[in-house]
Image: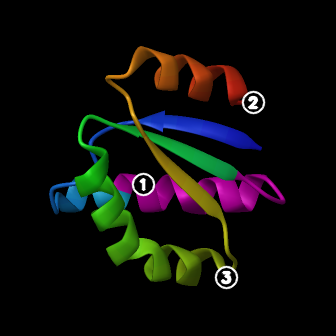
Amino acid sequence: MKVTIIGWYGTETIGDRAILAGLISLFSKTYDGFEIKLGSLYPFFSQRTINEDYSFYKEIINKDFKIKIFNSQNSKELVSAIEDSD
């Protein structure tokens, strides 16, 4: 399953991190495999946060998964992510 999520996820906001962890947990329970494209206003910060939290995400679902960050302000990247999603 390919999923696009658009949000912030980049400033140490514990609520955003918890929401993303919950979504990852839900997708893991619902689908055999999934891939996330995460739209961000500031992809650099979001990538840093994902890098910091990735081992935790893997721990809560007991498997690897793919997460790719894109600039949601770039209309071409946004449209491409949405069209590529299930």
Residues marked 2 and 1 touching at CB (< 8 Å): no
Measuring 57% from the left and 78% from the top, which residue is drawn there?
58
Count every numbered label the image shows and give the total.
3
Asked if residue 11 lies left or right of residue 39, the reply is: left
- Using the image, determine if residue 64 lies above or below residue 49: below
Question: Which dot marks residue 86?
Answer: 2
Give the distance between the C-alpha atoms of the residues marked 3 and 2, in whole angstroms: 23 Å
Label 3: element kind:
loop
Instruction: Find numbered disc 1 in the image and state the secondary structure of the residue it sits on.
Output: helix
The dot on residue 78 is: none
Residue 64 is inside the magenta segment: no
In this rendering, the answer to whether 28 lies above or below 83 is: below
Mark 2 vs mark 1, CA separation in Å: 18 Å
The three-letter code of the residue at mark 2 reads Asp
> Residue 47: horizontal and vertical position, in percent?
35, 59
Picture quarter with the N terminus = top right
The extreme right residue here reads: 32
User: Up-down: is 22 above or below 75?
Assistant: below
What is the quadrant of residue 80 in the picture?
top right
Q: Secondary structure at mark 2?
A: loop
Image location (x, y in percent) of residue 54: 46, 74
- In the rendered image, residue 40, in percent from the top left (x then y), is placed at 33, 38
The amino acid at mark 3 is Asn
Residue 86's x, y, as percent?
75, 30
Local packing at callout 3 (Cα closer than 10 Å; few below 14, some 14-19, many 20+) is few
Looking at the rendering, which quadrant does residue 52 occupy?
Answer: bottom left
Query: Which region is colored magenta?
Result: 19-34
Name the residue that disc number 1 marks.
20
Separation of residues labelled 3 and 1 (CA atoms):
16 Å
- Secondary structure mostly seen in magenta is helix
